[in-house]
Structures are given as structure tokens and as C-alpha cells.
């Protein structure tokens, strides 16, 4: 699996929000994760539209997680930014037996990312 810069930034933003004590402003998120500000705004909009974060304008506003960090998996964020990985074309002739291995690899990858939550990552880094 290849992860785009957008996904790396989105995961960083989500981890910043998961570790925050309250709402964070976009400029705080961008600065804390070294995300270009305009890029950060676009990512936050995408995450909000997907229902992973909430936002509020005003002096007490900012962004925060839409549900607890224990209930947001890495796969949730990756699906928003990368979409669903299409199944590749079949392996030709002699390489056909590899199809099963690649299917197992995709299943393992999906299972790991679906089981690993933001809270798990924060616990590992703390």
C-alpha cells in the first residue's frame, strides 16, 4: 500500500486532534504537524464532510473528533483520503497462484488498519 502525502497529513491532523484537550484551530493543527495551511484546510474539510471531525466557527471554535479516538480507526481516515483500493488486474498465467497471496496481503492490511485506532497510536507514542 502506498500512502499519499494527503493521507499522511490527515493522519497527523487526526492524531493532533485526538491528543488535544479541546477544539484546535486549523492554524494550530497545521503548525503542529508541519502541514501547509491551505492543504490543511482542504484536508479538514474532507474529514468534516466524511463525519470524522466536527467544527465550529468563532472565538471558542475549532476542530475536534466526531467520536472518541478509541472508535476511529486508521482505515477510516485512509478510506476518506485514498478511497477504496480497487482490486488490481489478475496475474497472468504462470503468476496466477500469486493472486491468493495478494488477496491475503490486502485482507491482512485492511484488518490491521481497521483494528488500529487513533487511541492505540497515542498509547504507543506516549
Image: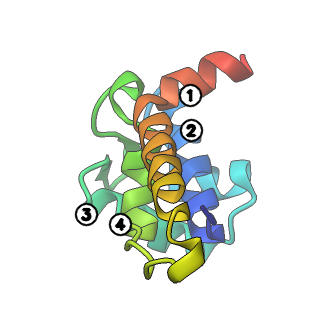
Q: Farthest residue toward the front?
A: 94
Q: Please, is residue 26 above or below residue 94 in the view? A: above
Give x and y (percent) for residue 54.
Answer: 29, 48
In screen coordinates, is 16 left or right of 58?
Answer: right
Task: Identify the mark nearer the N-term, 3 or 4.
Answer: 3
Say if mark 1 contacts mark 2, CB within 8 Å. yes
Cα–Cα gap, marks 3 and 2: 18 Å
Residue identifier under label 2? 15
- 47 vs 20, nearest the viewer: 47
Q: Provide the residue designation for mark 1.
A: 19
Across and down, in percent, residue 15 comes to 56, 38
Nearer the observer: mark 1 or 2; the answer is 2
Residue under the image location 28 percent in, 39 percent down:
66
* Residue at image mark 4: 84
Q: Secondary structure at mark 1?
A: helix
Task: Residue 49: give its label.
Answer: 3
Considering only order in the chain, which callout, 2 or 3, is on the residue closer to the N terminus? 2
* Of residues 32 and 88, the one drawn nearer to the viewer in this rendering: 88
Amino acid at each position: 500500500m502506498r500512502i499519499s502525502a494527503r493521507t499522511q497529513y490527515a493522519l497527523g491532523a487526526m492524531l493532533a486532534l485526538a491528543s488535544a484537550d479541546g477544539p484546535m484551530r486549523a492554524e494550530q493543527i497545521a503548525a503542529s504537524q508541519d502541514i501547509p495551511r491551505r492543504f490543511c484546510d482542504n484536508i479538514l474539510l474532507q474529514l468534516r464532510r466524511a463525519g470524522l471531525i466536527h467544527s465550529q466557527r468563532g472565538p471558542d471554535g475549532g476542530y475536534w473528533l466526531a467520536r472518541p479516538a478509541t472508535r476511529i480507526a486508521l482505515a477510516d481516515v485512509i478510506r476518506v483520503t485514498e478511497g477504496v483500493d480497487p482490486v488490481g488486474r489478475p496475474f497472468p498465467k504462470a503468476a496466477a497462484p500469486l493472486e491468493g497471496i495478494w488477496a491475503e496481503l490486502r485482507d491482512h492490511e485492511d484488518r490491521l488498519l481497521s483494528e488500529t485506532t487513533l487511541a492505540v497510536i497515542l498509547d504507543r507514542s506516549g
